[in-house]
Amino acid sequence: MGRSSRAPRRRSIKDVADLAGVSVGTVSNVLNKPALVAEETRIKVEAAIASLGFVRNGSARQLRAGTSQTVGAIVLDISNPFFTDVARGVEDRLAEDDHILILASSDDRLDKQHRYLRLLEEQGVQGVLVSPASNDLTWLDQTRARGTAVVLLDRPSPSPQICSVAVDDVKGGDLAATHLLELGHQRIGFVNGSTKIRQCADRRKGVRKALRAAGLRIADSLVETTVSALNADGGEEGLERLLRVSEPVTAIICANDLTALGVLRGLRRRRISVPEQMAVVGYDDVEFAGVLTTPLTSIRQPRYQIGRAAATLLLNEAGSRTHRHEQVLFQPELIVRESSGPPAR
């Protein structure tokens, strides 16, 4: 006969008590209040725990205590390195307070966002960090009313009663466009996502603000294209549209670095040199931006710090009934590299 495929039985607190020759209550005290147990007995119980490989049932303990050490985060797309770095900041900050992170991607879809929120609440998470997939945040009111702490991630709060951590994306769009204008570009392409996404809408506002400040007509100086996915394939899709316009652009701003990667890939396939024939500016300044064959000029966001700040706000709110809501707004920074230069003469 072959070996049984049944998983070994999880050892219980009663198994520990039987092996150590003590009561279940004594084992519980060793786990939770060791100062109440005589040293000789405590050593005997700890030896039994080690021998059996016993692991306490954390979920049952949390149910008895009415608390949880779990935090949820719903981001737009965890495959985007921006959110990966933000999640690392969240995770590291939570670990300092012995909390763990459950991470989910909404893929910019409201149905997935709402479903994950429901599942996280059912798991009894202490709080949720949310990068919203739409501008309508009324659905968060019910979550907060049920006692789950909420912090908006990478999105300014529309209410002083909701904590948030974000970056000034209007400023970021302004920095990107101003940089190209100062290089001499007069006709700029913009590969963007849906303006239903707050970040995309604000970056668009910033780009248009810079063009107006330079005295240029938007209709003459800006060619915008909206792609369905803010990734490399979306970037190449946007590039194809921009290259088909009758009056060509000399520079392209991308909504994030992933779309910029697709733009650079498409330009290379078409043997269009960067920056000599086309300047390119990304957004986020993720890790790969500086190590590409043509290093990417990008708008830097403090990704890791965003995550840490959001986790700190959530822990503070979940742990205090008198918590003072805060809205943290980081400032972006232009990082100039080799992908941007003056237009060809």
Image (cartoon, rainbow, N blue to C red):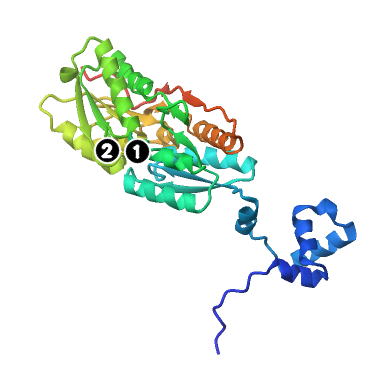
Number of the label disc, if any, that sits on residue 20: none
Query: Is the C-beta separation of discs 1 and 2 under 8 Å?
Result: yes
Q: Report crowding for label 1: few under 14, some 14 to 19, many 20 or more residues within 10 A (C-alpha).
A: many
Query: In front here: 21 or 66?
Result: 66
Find disc 1 in the rendering and name its residue: 258
Query: In front here: 255 or 41?
Result: 41
Find disc 2 in the rendering and name its residue: 235
Which residue appears farthest toward the bottom when viewing the image? Answer: 1
Q: Amino acid at mark 2?
A: Gly
Residue at point 54%, 36% (across, down): 314
Q: Amino acid at mark 1?
A: Leu
- Asked if one can make out residue 20 in the rendered structure from this viewpoint, the answer is yes
> How far apart, in angstroms, are the residues tagged by discs 1 and 2?
7 Å
Location of the N terminus (image quadrant): bottom right
When asked about the image quadrant of residue 43, the answer is: bottom right
* Mark positioned earlier in the residue sequence (1 or 2): 2
Q: Position of residue 323 (x, y in %)?
A: 58, 30
Q: Is residue 175 left or right of residue 68?
A: left
When asked about the image quadrant of residue 82, the answer is: top left
Residue 278, compared with residue 82, is above or below; it is above
Q: Is residue 243 left or right of residue 305?
A: left
Q: How many numbered marks does the figure carry?
A: 2
